Image: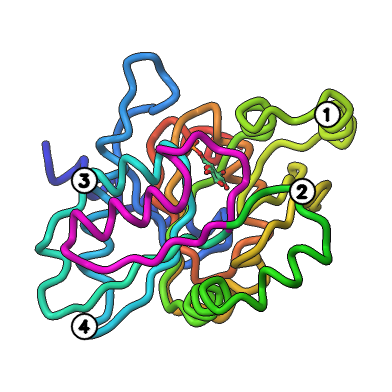
Amino acid sequence: PVIDTLAGRHQQEQALARQLGIAHCTLVPGDSSLPSGTLTGLAQATKRVLADQLPIGASTIAVMGGHTLAAVAAGLTPALSTQRQLLFVPARGGIGEAPEIQANAVSAQMAQRTNGQFRALYVPEQLNTATYKSLFAEPAIHDVLQLIAHSNVVIHGIGEASAMAKRRNMAPDVVADLNAAHAVGEAFGYFFDAAGHVVRKFPPIGLDIADLAAKPLVIAVAGGSEKGAAIQAYMHLAPAQTWLITDQGAADFVLKK
Ligand code: BG6
């Protein structure tokens, strides 16, 4: 019966949140890692959580990139802007992604879908420190960094370490280091092991994991059995108010332990 299923899911959401040490979990059916899996359930659930949790009035929403976040963006609608003024910004500068799943593209798409506003952050990768410093001083960049720093909402993905290293074309010696250090996951440019120890940081610019503690609403969207270990590991670093939106494939990994 439907009631039993809903009650069962609710119990699992609570068990998951407890086990991961975070405030809330939303669980959707399916396993997005399977060839037949999709990101639609995660995207729809994220839309519902945003509709319920975004404050009335003005919000600045910092978003990361990735396929999951791109799917979330594609599922948003103008209804989200009812009684709200939404400004979307990328949470961080370029970290070597294909253009269509970069944080800039995701925030632009979210703004377009919700009739909101967005500001892009164009910063090349792998610059030396002096160049970064002078870029920070550029008004166009400085202004967007200020908006990111003062964002009240963050929406981000979590990646599996080797998949992210490959996708970002990391050098073989860097990949070897990540393997040697048993990196299992990645978020915000940080690679970490199963215990949540940061093993490598690729810090371009923008929001840092440490900045998340001060954000009232932090939503992590990640699912699939292949990301189970990465999601569990990241939650050692995540701020306590994190709201995880995940699927059964990832939840089974966490709850079976
Ligand atoms: C990247 C983010 O764009 O997407 C990462 O920079 C995140 O921090 C990753 O881990 C997740 O990607 P996907 O495609 O698995 O949703």
Queried whether the magenta region covers residue 23, the answer comes back as: no
In front of the other: label 3 or label 2? 3
Q: Amino acid at mark 3?
A: Gly
| Rendering coords of residue 228 (x, y %) | 56, 36
| Rendering coords of residue 100 (x, y %) | 40, 37
* The label number, if any, that marks residue 195 in the structure image: 2
Residue at the spot x=55%, y=27% of the render?
226
Question: What is the secondary structure assignment of the residue under circle 1?
Answer: helix
Residue at the spot x=52%, y=40% of the render?
255
Find disc 4 in the rendering and name its residue.
Answer: 56
Which residue is farthest bottom?
A: 57
Quadrant of the drawing holding the C terminus: top right
Residue 99 to residue 61: above or below: above
Q: Which residues are magenta?
A: 93-122
Q: Amino acid at mark 1?
A: Asn
Spatial distance from mark 4 to mark 1, Cα to Cα? Answer: 45 Å
Question: What is the secondary structure assignment of the residue under circle 3?
Answer: helix
Q: Residues within 10 Å of mark 3 (few under 14, many from 20)?
A: many
In front of the other: label 2 or label 1? 1
Label 3 vs 2, first from the N-terminus: 3
The answer, for residue 243, to whether it is visible in the render is no
Spatial distance from mark 4 to mark 2, Cα to Cα? Answer: 37 Å
Spatial distance from mark 4 to mark 3, Cα to Cα? Answer: 20 Å
